[in-house]
């Protein structure tokens, strides 16, 4: 009975921590979330990858992220777009398809930077800071993900503000919100305790002469 009571207490404490952490990130980083027209200018927009269909089309979530970032570029809020996503497999390349979409929306190729090793939010933020030399950025993603992204970037040394790319209703959006409970706890563990080293390489600063 004692062991069962201890396990139950640990489980309850864990649940409270996960829910409380998510509530805190929502509260803390709401102040850093802006509408596209009002967001403070930053040198770079970090655009997080998401699903790409087998025919190369971006999922609605990813298409809206890229389109929102393009709006920021075209209105002078950012000078460069850092497209970060997954490219672990030969037939799956999020950053390349994000680039094509941005080019079709009128962004010059020289103002698009690709990060092929942004396999997760932590990796994207870590590499933005340590590979691409980003210390100020606008993060572009949907609102369900934005608080965690801001939290991660903040803890990894990036002065970040966020713009939510919520241009439509997304299928399974409740699933994404629920998934963020565990994902935020994992993010806390990564930036506070484990500090994993993502795939690295030579430094490729976006603004090498500044």
Image: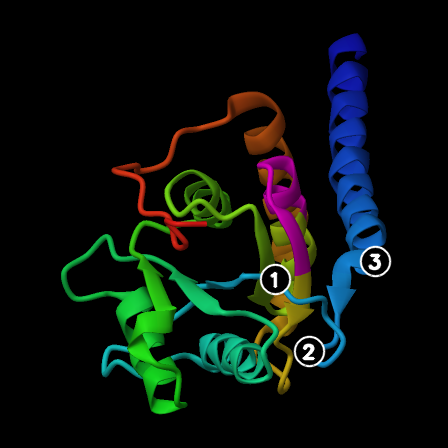
Earlier residue among tags 3 and 1: 3
Label 2: few (<14), some (14–19) or many (≥20) C-alpha neighbours in 10 Å: many
Label 3: few (<14), some (14–19) or many (≥20) C-alpha neighbours in 10 Å: few
Q: Assign the N terminus to one quadrant of the image.
A: top right
Secondary structure of the residue carrying numbered label 2: loop
Residue under the image location 34 percent in, 90 percent down: 104
Image position of 71 (left or right of 62):
right
Q: Residue 42 carries which label?
A: 1
Image position of 129 (left or right of 174):
left
Residue under the image location 39 percent in, 54 percent down: 206
Earlier residue among tags 2 and 3: 3
User: Closer to the camera, 20 or 64?
Assistant: 64
Q: Is residue 150 magenta?
A: no
Earlier residue among tags 2 and 1: 2
The residue tagged 3 is: 31
Please, which residue is most extreme toward the front here?
Answer: 209
Question: Where is residue 64 drawn, in percent x and y?
Answer: 52, 81
């Amino acid at each position: 009975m004692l062991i069962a009571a201890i396990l139950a207490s640990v489980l309850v404490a864990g649940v409270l921590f996960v829910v409380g952490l998510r509530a805190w990130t929502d509260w803390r980083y709401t102040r850093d979330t802006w509408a596209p027209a009002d967001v403070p200018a930053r040198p770079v927009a970090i655009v997080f990858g998401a699903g790409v269909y087998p025919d190369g089309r971006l999922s609605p979530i990813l298409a809206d992220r890229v389109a929102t970032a393009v709006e920021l570029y075209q209105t002078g809020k950012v000078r460069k777009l850092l497209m970060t996503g997954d490219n672990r497999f030969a037939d799956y390349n999020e950053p390349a398809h994000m680039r094509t979409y941005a080019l079709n929306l009128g962004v010059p190729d020289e103002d698009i930077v690709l990060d092929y090793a942004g396999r997760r939010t932590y990796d994207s933020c870590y590499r933005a800071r340590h590979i691409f030399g980003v210390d100020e950025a606008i993060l572009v993603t949907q609102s369900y993900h934005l608080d965690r992204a801001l939290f991660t970037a903040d803890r990894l040394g990036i002065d970040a503000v966020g713009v939510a790319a919520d241009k439509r209703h997304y299928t399974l959006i409740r699933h994404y919100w629920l998934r963020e409970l565990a994902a935020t706890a994992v993010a806390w563990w990564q930036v506070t305790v484990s500090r994993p080293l993502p795939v690295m390489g030579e430094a490729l600063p976006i603004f090498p002469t500044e």
